[in-house]
Image (cartoon, coloured by chain):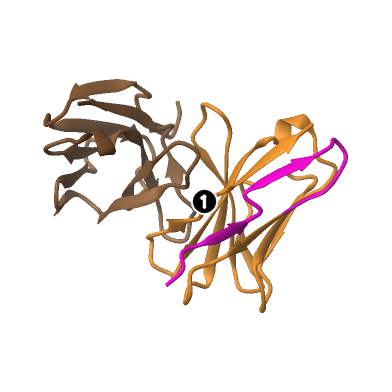
Chain colours: A brown, B orange
Amino acid sequence: QKEVEQDPGPLSVPEGAIVSLNCTYSNSAFQYFMWYRQYSRKGPELLMYTYSSGNKEDGRFTAQVDKSSKYISLFIRDSQPSDSATYLCAMKDVGDGLTFGKGTHLIIQP
Amino acid sequence: NAGVMQNPRHLVRRRGQEARLRCSPMKGHSHVYWYRQLPEEGLKFMVYLQKENIIDESGMPKERFSAEFPKEGPSILRIQQVVRGDSAAYFCASSPGSPEAFFGQGTRLTVV
């Protein structure tokens, strides 16, 4: 069983739709949860960072963490074509490097 | 405030040569991480360094790969005697010590 599972997609939605991206994980030691956005041939860009369970909102983005279910989500409201990218979930314990999912390729259709 | 700087952006090496990848962290960041990304694969952790110390190298191949982060200058990821399987994008991330990590644009290594 892989440590972090993420559906690679592609996920294609019309402009303006709400996008839901998800990851599951198996290591209960993970405490910090992040979402990165990566455009083709670019470095990952940190979007959201959360600690432990709960919700965090930043503009059109909302991150949710449910540690009891080992499940994290990223919601994007009012999606735009510029949101088309690969979204990577990542998580870690104190002092460790990040463990990444494989990424979900998101396409927002104009 | 410059971000994480990696160079070169693209590197071509023949089999058996050495590859040196450089990473300058963001100003004020003393923690550096290296990751490798293979086509269709996620980012894989390689090594975590602080100034002059290797903290965690559990993701580094046992042979041919080494990393350093000297007191002065950039962090270096060194790959000796490269093979075709080393072809990948190598990313560096830096952190001030908080869990958030900020990535550079990567070095794309091609072994021919």
Drawn side of residue B112 relative to residue A38, left or right: right
Image position, residue A78 (x, y; %): 11, 37
Residue A71 visible in the current orientation: no
Quadrant in the picture for residue A4: top left
Residue range (magenta): B1-20
Residue that numbered label 1 is attached to: B105
Instruction: Count the labels in the image.
Output: 1
- Quarter of the picture containing the C terminus of chain B is top right
- Quarter of the picture containing the N terminus of chain B is bottom left
Letter of the chain that mark 1 sits on in the rendering: B
Image position, residue B83 (x, y; %): 80, 34
Image position, residue A45 (x, y; %): 38, 50
Residue B97 in the image: above or below residue B60: below
Residue B91 in the image: above or below residue A9: below
Residue A22 visible in the current orientation: yes
For the point 52% across and 73% down, which residue is it?
A: B30
